[in-house]
Image (cartoon, helix red, strand yellow):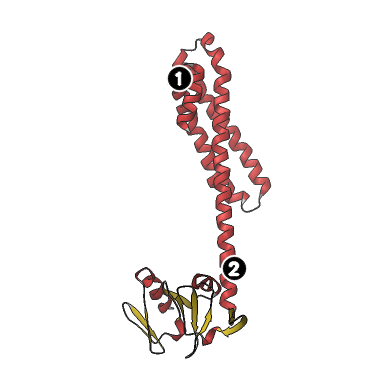
Amino acid sequence: MFILLNVLFGSKWNSFTDAFFFTSMLFPVALGTAYFFNGVLVPRFLNQQNYFTFSLYSLYTLIASVCLSQIAIVLAFILLTNLNWQMLDPLVKDVTQLQFVIYVIVFLFGFIQVYQTNQSNKNQIENLSEKAKANLQESITVRSNRQNVNIRLSEINYIESLSDYVKIWNGDEPIITREKISHLEEKLPDIFVRCHRSFLANANKIDSVSYDQLVINGKEIPIGRKYKAQVSEIMKT
């Protein structure tokens, strides 16, 4: 963005040095304003729905920022033209445009960042809400043999994925379903731990755990390298 502004105004003024100088003088003020706006005012007032205080302090911030920008512009003119007003006239309007463009770009990116952060927080809250509901459920319904089968979670020992189908082991004879193991993992409470890309284990049913496997009802289930931390964490609770 900084380079683009230099190219845009440098070609217009026929002096990339002047464009670089003015942009370098104005940019820190605009960036500082955007940082204060997005890092302080938005989380402290806007996100707390304190709209009046947010609007008031935003106005103060804008006024202070514009004053600082004008000081930077005057200093730049002094250094570049030695207060030769005949040289100032054609540049005054263009520098004001440069200042406006910088503010628009910086605040636009700031608002985009705020929007993305809010969306991310919203998605996290929704995921936590769904997980909380899952932790309260007592059973799960899956499609097996062309009918819906309701399975009590407390009866499930582990779930095994085999190519294009899944076995839910809650006894000697598993319930077979076409659902993906990743989909089942999302629907199940936290007590079901992913110990391998092909296995989901009920932590309440684990008899023993070693470095690379766990045992449930005499069945040895491998622990994948990328899932070791998850297994260790669930076993601590």
Q: Residue at x 66, y 50 (%)?
A: 50
> Crowding at label 1, few (<14), some or many (≥20) Cα neighbours within 10 Å?
some
On screen, residue 86 above or below 62: above
Query: Hey, which quadrant is residue 107 in on the image?
Result: top right
Query: Between disc 1 and disc 2, whose residue precedes?
Result: 1
Q: Residue at x 51, y 11 (%)?
A: 87
Q: Position of residue 40 (x, y in %)?
A: 55, 46
Nearest to the observer: residue 191 or residue 236? 191
Q: Residue at x 58, y 43 (%)?
A: 111
The type of residue carrying mark 2 is Ser
Mark 1 to mark 2: distance in Å?
Answer: 55 Å
Q: Position of residue 81 (x, y in %)?
A: 47, 13
Q: Secondary structure at mark 1?
A: helix
Of the 4 image quadrants, the one containing the C terminus is bottom left
Q: Position of residue 88 (x, y in %)?
A: 53, 13
Q: Which residue is mark 2?
A: 129
On screen, residue 109 above or below 207: above
Q: Residue at x 61, y 52 (%)?
A: 47
Left or right of 162: which side holds 57? right
Q: Secondary structure at mark 2?
A: helix
Nearest to the observer: residue 34 or residue 234? 234
Nearest to the observer: residue 6 or residue 220? 220
The type of residue carrying mark 1 is Asp
Q: Which mark is residue 18?
A: 1
On screen, residue 128 above or below 8: below
